[in-house]
Image (tube, rainbow, N blue to C red):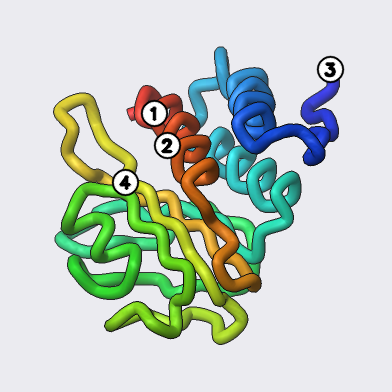
Amino acid sequence: MQLSKNIDHSNPKAIVYKELLEQIKALTVGENELIANLGNICALLKYEMNWFWVGFYFVKNDELVLGTFQGPLACTRIKKGKGVCGSAWERNETIVVPNVNLFEGHIACSSLTQSEIVLPIRNNEGTCIGVLDVDSEKLNNFEEADKKGLETIVEFINQMF
């Protein structure tokens, strides 16, 4: 079984994200091990999209705790409302930050991160139970097409909870 295929990045982003979602489904449907699924999702997104860092944080005891990720070392715990991740959790909405240096209260786990997008992971009741955090070494690296594409992927991930 081929686990992944190269995606043609000359296609519009909507098609790229559709192909990413197809690969995520191929990797996870029928596999019930959550950590394995989230690890493979992180690896696929990081290496296929060439992002600096991709990972999950989950709510535990009123703070976000680092889960599976791909990339350099990361902050282990984040308080609600703190940084981009804590803010996305508190607001229960996607936050796109073109320049993290201009985001008040940004938590710099790595000084190499320049832009970021954070998406809430929700349970069946719509409660934010975690976030998907994606960091880039490039300024302004996330646009509306990335937001929409990643939100579609997160809608699929939400079904795992």
Residue type at mark 3: give it: Met
| Residue 161 image point, x, y percent | 32, 29
Which is more foreground, mark 3 or mark 2?
2
The residue under the point 26% across, 48% down is 93
The residue under the point 30% across, 71% down is 78
Given contact means CB atoms under 8 Å apart, are the residues at marks 2 and 4 in contact?
no
Given contact means CB atoms under 8 Å apart, are the residues at marks 1 and 2 in contact?
yes
| Residue 13 image point, x, y percent | 64, 37
Q: Give the Cα separation between the discs numbered 1 and 4.
A: 10 Å
Q: Quadrant of residue 17?
A: top right
Q: Which residue is mark 4?
A: 120
**N-terminal-most mark, 2 or 4:** 4
| 66 in relation to 78, above or below | above
Which numbered tag is attached to residue 144?
A: none
Residue type at mark 4: give it: Pro
Q: Residues within 10 Å of mark 1 (few under 14, many from 20)?
A: few
The residue under the point 25% across, 44% down is 129
Q: State whether residue 27 appears in this view.
A: no
Q: Which residue is mark 3?
A: 1
Q: Give the Cα separation between the discs numbered 1 and 2.
A: 6 Å
Residue type at mark 2: give it: Glu
Q: Residues within 10 Å of mark 3 (few under 14, many from 20)?
A: few
Q: Which residue is mark 1?
A: 155
Q: Residues within 10 Å of mark 2 (few under 14, many from 20)?
A: some
Q: Give the Cα separation between the discs numbered 1 and 3.
A: 26 Å
Q: Give the Cα separation between the discs numbered 3 and 2.
A: 28 Å
Residue type at mark 1: give it: Glu
Q: Which residue is mark 2?
A: 151
Q: Give the Cα separation between the discs numbered 2 and 4.
A: 9 Å
Q: Secondary structure at mark 1?
A: helix
